Amino acid sequence: MSELAREAPEVDGILRRQLGKLEEGAVDKNAWQLRYGFDDILSLEPAALKKEPSTCGSVNPTASLPLIRCDSAQASVCFSSMDDGVMGGVSQGMVTYQEDDACAVFSGVVSTANNGGFSSIRCRDSFPLLKDYKGFYVDCMAQDATKVFQFVVKDIEAVQTYVNFKAPFRAPADSFGRVHIPFSAFDEPEQMGRRVVRAPVDLSSMAELGFMVLKPSIGEFMLRFKEIGVYK
């Protein structure tokens, strides 16, 4: 099996289908067949939107290691925001510190106007080797328990090539809870919402962690979070 067929079977299937339609000497017709195939690839729904979101209570870990503690206003400063304004959109998001609950707050609104549709915050840092762990955890609480958030991770290569690894999760709305997100959920690298073919996320060179809200989860959102870490 080719690397493309293994890492992106839907893309591989579309390309094979269109290649099978090519005719010897039909230059213009063949060009259009390939164009139709690329259009189909671009229309594929991002894989992260098809996954079942992680929730509280699904894992019983044996050990954990905190990576980011948001127990002071200074701790939340490590997060920077990036919204769809970079592409002309009007979504807005920000991270603040809430002293009453001693937590960071990611809040804003996601809009699809002007072809937009996402808001995100990222923390870039040097993280320890994570290969001996099973996944990430987030101590969090949402304004709306039905809202789907994306946990975003990047290794050094992903930072350099603008690639994201995302996994969906939902946070409880009545109180803070710990959501466990297994490393296996980060199995579909993407760039600007489109799948790319590359190696799995490198847990020995983790460089960036963060959160994202993207369409179809539009409208207002609020995520309070106290701690991000990894578990065994």
Image (cartoon, rainbow, N blue to C red):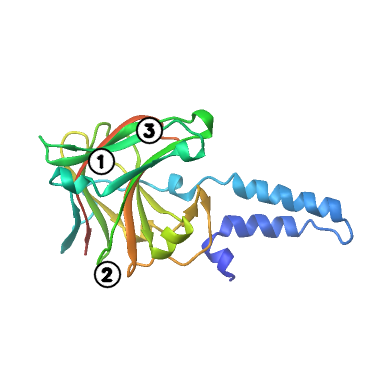
- Between disc 1 and disc 2, the foreground one is 2
Q: CA distance from mark 3 to mark 2?
A: 33 Å
- Between disc 3 and disc 1, the foreground one is 3
Callout 3: helix, strand or loop? strand
Amino acid carrying label 2: it is Leu
Q: Pick the residue in front: 19 or 213.
A: 213
Q: Is residue 224 above or below residue 38?
A: above
Query: Is 114 on the left-hand or right-hand side of 80?
Result: right
Q: Are marks 1 and 2 in contact (CB under 8 Å)?
A: no
Residue bearing the label numbered 3: 92
Q: Is residue 55 above or below residue 5?
A: above
Q: CA distance from mark 1 to mark 2?
A: 26 Å
Q: Pick the residue in front: 10 or 107.
A: 107
Image coordinates of residue 53 in percent, x first then y, are 35, 46
Which residue is drawn at the image coordinates 66% and 46% (left, top)?
39
Residue bearing the label numbered 2: 129
Q: Are marks 3 and 2 in contact (CB under 8 Å)?
A: no
Hey, which residue is sitting farthest right in the picture?
Answer: 25
Query: Is 31 on the left-hand or right-hand side of 53?
Result: right
Residue bearing the label numbered 1: 171
Which residue is drawn at the image coordinates 38% and 67% (left, top)?
202
Of pointers 3 and 1, the one earlier in the residue sequence: 3
Q: Pick the residue in front: 136 or 70.
A: 70
Amino acid carrying label 1: it is Ala
Q: Residues within 10 Å of mark 1 (few under 14, many from 20)?
A: many
Query: Is 43 on the left-hand or right-hand side of 62?
Result: right
Amino acid carrying label 3: it is Gln
Q: Which quarter of the rendered picture does the C terminus lie within?
A: bottom left
Of pointers 1 and 2, the one earlier in the residue sequence: 2
Q: Pick the residue in front: 58 or 178.
A: 178
- Between disc 3 and disc 2, the foreground one is 3
Query: Is 109 on the left-hand or right-hand side of 85?
Result: left
